[in-house]
Amino acid sequence: MSVETPRPILIFDGDCAFCTRSVRVLERRVRRRPTVEAWQRLDLDALGVSREECEAAVQWIGADGSRASGHVAVARTLIHGGKGWELLGRSLLVPGPSWVAARVYAWVARNRHRMPGGTAECSLPAADRSSTGGGSR
């Protein structure tokens, strides 16, 4: 399903403290950025993305309805940032660096509860998380 949005959207796990901290760094550093929103605050059906996809990896929905997840979503976000960010984002999509970026992203996603700012809540499936969550909303 392809849904057009007025601005690109980067969707992250708002119950994960590490994820929340990471997008806050993005918001401070990248001036031209997509809308950044926790999946818990969105109508996922309307966006054509599932809860499972959002729990597994960060999601990108472009203004044209294009979609990406994981390291490719990060790359698209950086490309959208323009200037030096665009160069960094494009480098994450080049064969070789893309392979490395995919593995690094997967490792971080599996170990986000161990990362700076991460909590035990980050490692649990959403259905098993406490009502207070592990991150700020």
Image (tube, helix red, strand yellow):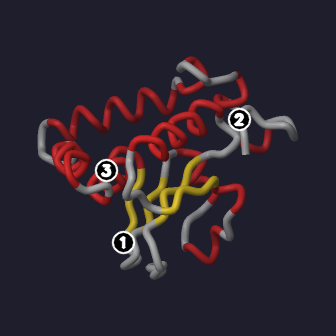
Residue 78 tag number: 3
User: Does 137 sit left or right of 58 as displayed?
Assistant: right
Q: Amino acid at mark 3?
A: Leu
- Percent coordinates x, y for residue 44 in the rendering: 63, 68
**Position above or below: 99 against 108:** below
Q: First in sequence: mark 1 or mark 3?
A: 1
- Percent coordinates x, y for residue 91 in the rendering: 16, 44
For image coordinates 17% across by 36% down, the residue present is 97
Nearer to me, 6 or 15? 6
User: Does 115 sit left or right of 121 as displayed?
Assistant: left
- Report how far apart the C-alphas of labels 2 and 3 lie in the structure: 23 Å
The residue singled out by tag 2 in the image is: 135
Helix, strand or loop for disc 1: loop
Helix, strand or loop for disc 3: helix
Q: Amino acid at mark 2?
A: Gly
Q: Is label 1 in contact with label 2 (beta carbons under 8 Å)?
A: no
Q: Amino acid at mark 1?
A: Ser
- Percent coordinates x, y for residue 101 in the rendering: 28, 36
The residue singled out by tag 1 in the image is: 66
- Report how far apart the C-alphas of labels 1 and 2 lie in the structure: 28 Å
Residue 40 tag number: none
For image coordinates 36% across by 79% down, the residue present is 64
Q: Residues within 10 Å of mark 3 (few under 14, many from 20)?
A: many
User: Which tag is nearer the camera, tag 1 or tag 3?
Assistant: 3
**Position above or below: 125 against 75:** above
Q: Residues within 10 Å of mark 1 (few under 14, many from 20)?
A: some
- Percent coordinates x, y for residue 5 in the rendering: 48, 78
Helix, strand or loop for disc 2: loop
For image coordinates 32% across by 32% down, the residue present is 103
Count of numbered labels shown in the rendering: 3
